Amino acid sequence: MKIDDELMKHDDERIICRCEEITLGQIRKAIQDGARDLDSVKRMTRAGAGLCQNKTCYNLVARIIHMETGIPLSQLEPFTSRPPVRPVPVKCWSNVHV
């Protein structure tokens, strides 16, 4: 996905993570507050923590970190993958039939 660098510089309301509705401005704020890798941005904003598990926003978030900090893309570690947590009814864990 090609990103228009000029547009990205001026559009803080642009949604970067669609699952969690995280904007470019929120990601920039996290970077200004010290995030220097994808997991830090994820912890501070939830970008990459939605149902797609960063399949949609990974390249965008990595590129933003690169543009804001100058860290080469090749040095950015991928997000730590975790399965989404979903509520499970208690009866699924019981051998007792009600």
Image (cartoon, grey):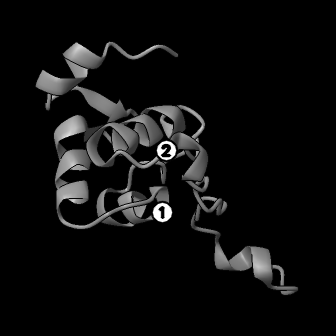
* Closer to us: 35 or 22: 35
Q: Residue at x 21, y 15 (%)?
A: 7
Q: Is 65 left, or right, of 10 in this rendering? A: right
Establish if 38 lies above or below 1: below
Packing grade of label 1 (10 A; few <14, some 14-19, many >=20) is: many
Establish if 61 lies above or below 1: below
* Closer to us: 53 or 60: 60
- Give the numbered dot on residue 64: none
Q: Residue at x 25, y 67 (%)?
A: 34
Question: For residue 14, which quarter of the picture?
Answer: top left
Identify the element where label 2 is drawn.
loop
Q: Is 53 left, or right, of 92 in this rendering? A: left
Where is residue 51? Give x, y as percent. 55, 45
Establish if 55 lies above or below 65: above
Q: Are marks 2 and 1 in contact (CB under 8 Å)?
A: no
Identify the element where label 1 is drawn.
helix
Packing grade of label 2 (10 A; few <14, some 14-19, many >=20) is: few
Q: CA distance from mark 2 to mark 1?
A: 16 Å
**Residue on which disc 1 sits:** 39
Q: Is residue 98 visible?
A: no
**Residue on which disc 2 sits:** 72
